[in-house]
Amino acid sequence: MKKEIKITVPKDYSAITLKKYLNIQEDLDNYKDDPQAQDAFLLWNLCKITPEVARALDSDTVTKIKSDLYELMNKTEYELTKFITIDNVEYGFEPNLSEMAYGAYLDLSKYEELKIDKNWPNILSILYRPVTKKSGALYEIQPYDSNNILDPKKWYDVNMDFMFGCFFFFNRIYLALLNDTLKSLTEEVLTNPNQPQHIKQILRESGEVINQLQSSHKGTLLDFQK
């Protein structure tokens, strides 16, 4: 007698928290040389399919499940959510990245890669601060103070659709800012080849960061075998 099993494959990231996502990423990294183990982790964590059940499924069903998960994990159409309420406090995304406080910029620059990993909650606590004023579409947030930011652990229970909206928006804007900086410094060096050595060093480092951002645009997503 056949036993009927109901399998639910998530269609979006609204049911997957940052904490769960990071745990899955850690499992995948620990077994990066074992694709079958990675598949098993994903099927269990995202669909609650045990290894025993997975072995009992026919190949067409497994292929369809993996195809649906692959489609989910490569979605990039997420919009930035400017506001979020945590512990009854409303936080707003940095309204003007081009005029971001220098201290905030320095703290963000400490992270060598822009990706959703263990450092991502720290980045969010820099970008999102308590809203102090709202007027139509305009709003203000508290000035940046590294000693007075939201506890990064508070972000672990926020869902991944929010996370990806912020990631892709910040990635695009930050990349544009770096490109503008690189272009300006390049023109400065071409105009005056005798620029100090530190200017040329900034150019090299900016180019490296841009390459990292471009490669991380999709690299932050879970890597799932088709």
Image (cartoon, helix red, strand yellow):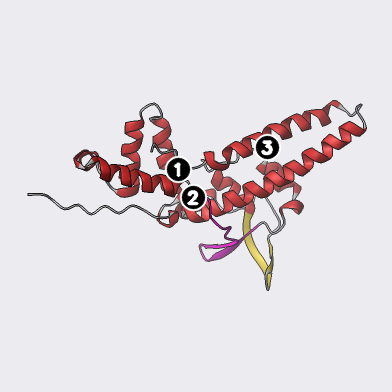
Q: How far apart are marks 2 and 1 (CA)?
A: 17 Å
Q: For numbered disc 2, what is the local secondary structure?
A: loop
Q: Mark 3 points at which residue?
A: 210
Q: Give coordinates of residue 215: x percent, y percent.
A: 59, 36
In the rendered image, which quarter is residue 226 located in? top left
Question: Residue 22's mark?
Answer: 1
Which of the marked residues, 2 or 1, is nearer the chain's N terminus? Answer: 1
Q: Nearer the viewer, residue 208 or 109?
A: 208
Q: Give coordinates of residue 14: x percent, y percent.
A: 43, 57
Q: How far apart are marks 3 and 1 (CA)?
A: 24 Å
Identified by mark 2, the residue type is Lys
Q: Is residue 113 magenta?
A: no
Residue at the bottom extreme, as displayed: 136
Q: Mark 2 points at which residue?
A: 75
Magenta-drawn segment: 75-93
Residue at the left extreme, as displayed: 1
Q: Which of 165 and 226 is in front in this view?
A: 226
